[in-house]
């Protein structure tokens, strides 16, 4: 079967590798000049900057792709485990060193609030239960409402009607520890005060399987997976933007795609790794969308966007770890500014990434490669990033310089940034959302846009906006779901 995959993010690569291994003729069409989607690599002045994502969990999902292709992962990419996973820093100067060592975790809790140790043990037991149920569903499609009904009793038992913050707060009392164990939904575009408590399982996932890094950066993982796909006989076309999915008026089935240059590429099945909302609104004509109408798409809730500053310094900051979570003076108030009020606050919480702590080759000798990420509202608010980006960049650099990176401004020798306009205009994300559909209970599992289109039976979706959601485990699993659905589908479906 001839299959076209739109986009070469991790979801598209996952699906394409699996489909090629099944014996199909797969062609990936990528808009940009490099594969990777959001995991684009910026190279300048001797520095390499990963566009993101930079936190790798569930490494077995990556190994599966090489195993089913009967190739050795080690021949393509080297993954190593990070310790600590993160340093979580607070404005009072306290630091939680977070890793998989339970003795360390307990010691950190005792340092913050001894009274919370018993509550943490209860929390860990509860997340273990959620993890066992949740991971069993991560690569299962939710195409029918009956799929949801089957797991509903377990969802209720696991308190999935609560938010992650509500779930954590029933066990933990110290405000800083509450942040330590509830911030994880932000890594997948979720509001900890609204995302379903199912995402509390990320803590157990990290405790069990660790946090990993691809030597050479996330771009090295993209390169390895792309090479694996090509070695299987797949085709990749860069600088090839799809303008429309071609649909037969009588059968209402996709027959291929047309590119922005007018080239028609026939296909018996189309897989979109592009943003789900963008695909429906821009690539599928409205007359073929009875269920996913413009109105339905625009009424959905979308995750926040990001402002990311990439910078290189001509010195190394050895006391900063690979991953740093820098908590600001407000937690819930700031998150509500971002998700609810769509307001760009003057304060911020930041994720600071220093990959040269693990792999110095990503910068010139004696230098560090960085990015600092700030969650910001998507473009549904009233922020004009054409005038706001530079002052916002300056405020972040000033904050880092005052609190964590002495003399930073005079040591930055290379930089660039992306903002919500980049997510909208370059990455084709609706409203400039960095993670597509927001992961709340009423937009999860069956309620999320399905992996198989309900309007076009041979159009499938991978990536953050479909089931199971954002984050590397989610998008890689979406590719597995799609490949298995196509592999089981009758010839005309």
Image (cartoon, helix red, strand yellow):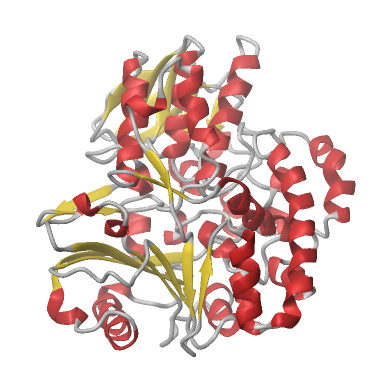
Q: Is residue 75 above or below residue 83?
A: above
Q: In the depicted view, which residue is nearer to us: 275 or 264?
A: 275
* Image quadrant where residue 106 sits: bottom right
Q: In the depicted view, which residue is nearer to us: 155 or 184?
A: 184
Q: Is residue 249 above or below residue 113?
A: above
- The image shows a total of numbered marks equal to 0
Residue name at image x 27 percent, y 27 percent: 237
Q: Is residue 243 above or below residue 177?
A: above
Q: In the depicted view, which residue is nearer to us: 110 or 214?
A: 110
Q: In the depicted view, which residue is nearer to us: 197 or 5?
A: 197
Residue name at image x 46 percent, y 67 percent: 378
The reply, left or right, for residue 217 in relation to residue 2 is left
Horizontal and vertical percent for residue 157? 88, 54
The reply, left or right, for residue 245 in relation to residue 288 is left
Q: Quadrant of the C terminus?
A: top right
Q: Is residue 247 visible?
A: no
Horizontal and vertical percent for residue 492? 61, 12
Horizontal and vertical percent for residue 284? 48, 37
Horizontal and vertical percent for residue 134? 72, 45
Q: Is residue 199 visible?
A: yes
* Image quadrant where residue 423 sits: bottom left
The reply, left or right, for residue 411 in relation to residue 345 is left
């Amino acid at each position: 079967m001839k299959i076209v995959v739109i986009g070469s993010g991790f979801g598209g690569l996952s699906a394409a590798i699996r489909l090629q291994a099944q014996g199909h003729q797969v062609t990936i069409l990528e808009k940009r000049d490099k594969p990777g989607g959001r995991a684009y690599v910026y190279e300048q002045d001797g520095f390499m900057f990963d566009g993101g994502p930079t936190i790798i969990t569930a490494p077995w999902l990556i190994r599966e792709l090489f195993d089913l292709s009967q190739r050795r992962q080690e021949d393509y990419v080297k993954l190593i485990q990070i310790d600590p996973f993160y340093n979580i820093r607070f404005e009072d100067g306290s630091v939680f060193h977070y890793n998989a060592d339970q003795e360390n975790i307990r010691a950190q809790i005792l340092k913050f609030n001894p009274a919370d140790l018993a509550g943490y043990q209860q929390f860990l037991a509860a997340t273990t239960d959620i993890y066992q149920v949740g991971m069993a569903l991560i690569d299962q499609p939710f195409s029918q409402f009956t799929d949801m009904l089957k797991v509903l009793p377990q969802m209720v038992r696991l308190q999935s009607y609560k938010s992650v913050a509500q779930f954590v707060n029933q066990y933990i009392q110290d405000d800083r520890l509450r942040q330590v164990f509830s911030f994880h939904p932000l890594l997948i575009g979720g509001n900890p005060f609204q995302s379903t408590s199912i995402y509390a399982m990320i803590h157990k996932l990290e405790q069990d399987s660790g946090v990993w890094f691809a030597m050479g950066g996330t771009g090295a993982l993209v390169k390895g997976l792309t090479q694996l796909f090509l070695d299987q006989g797949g085709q990749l076309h860069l600088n090839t933007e799809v303008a429309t999915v071609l649909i037969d008026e009588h059968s209402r089935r996709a027959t291929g795609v047309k590119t922005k240059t007018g080239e028609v590429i026939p296909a018996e099945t189309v897989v979109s790794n592009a943003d789900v909302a963008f695909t429906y609104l821009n690539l599928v004509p409205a007359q073929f969308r009875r269920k996913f109408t413009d109105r339905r798409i625009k009424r959905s809730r979308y995750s926040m966007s990001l402002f990311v500053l990439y910078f290189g310094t001509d010195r190394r900051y050895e006391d900063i770890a690979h991953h740093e979570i820098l908590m600001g003076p407000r937690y819930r108030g700031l998150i509500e500014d971002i998700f609810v009020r769509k307001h760009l606050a003057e304060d911020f919480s930041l994720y600071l990434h220093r990959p040269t702590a693990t792999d110095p080759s990503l910068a010139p000798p004696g230098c560090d490669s960085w990015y600092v990420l700030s969650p910001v509202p998507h473009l549904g608010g009233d922020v004009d990033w054409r005038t706001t980006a530079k002052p916002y960049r300056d405020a972040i650099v000033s904050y880092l310089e005052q609190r964590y990176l002495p003399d930073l401004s005079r040591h930055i020798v290379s930089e660039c940034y992306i903002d919500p306009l980049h997510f909208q205009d370059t990455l084709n994300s609706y409203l400039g959302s960095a993670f597509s559909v927001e992961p709340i209970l009423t937009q999860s599992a069956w309620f999320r846009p399905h992996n198989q289109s309900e309007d076009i039976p041979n159009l499938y979706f991978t990536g953050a906006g479909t089931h199971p959601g954002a984050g590397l485990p989610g998008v890689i699993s979406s590719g597995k779901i799609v490949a298995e659905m196509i592999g089981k589908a009758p010839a005309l479906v």
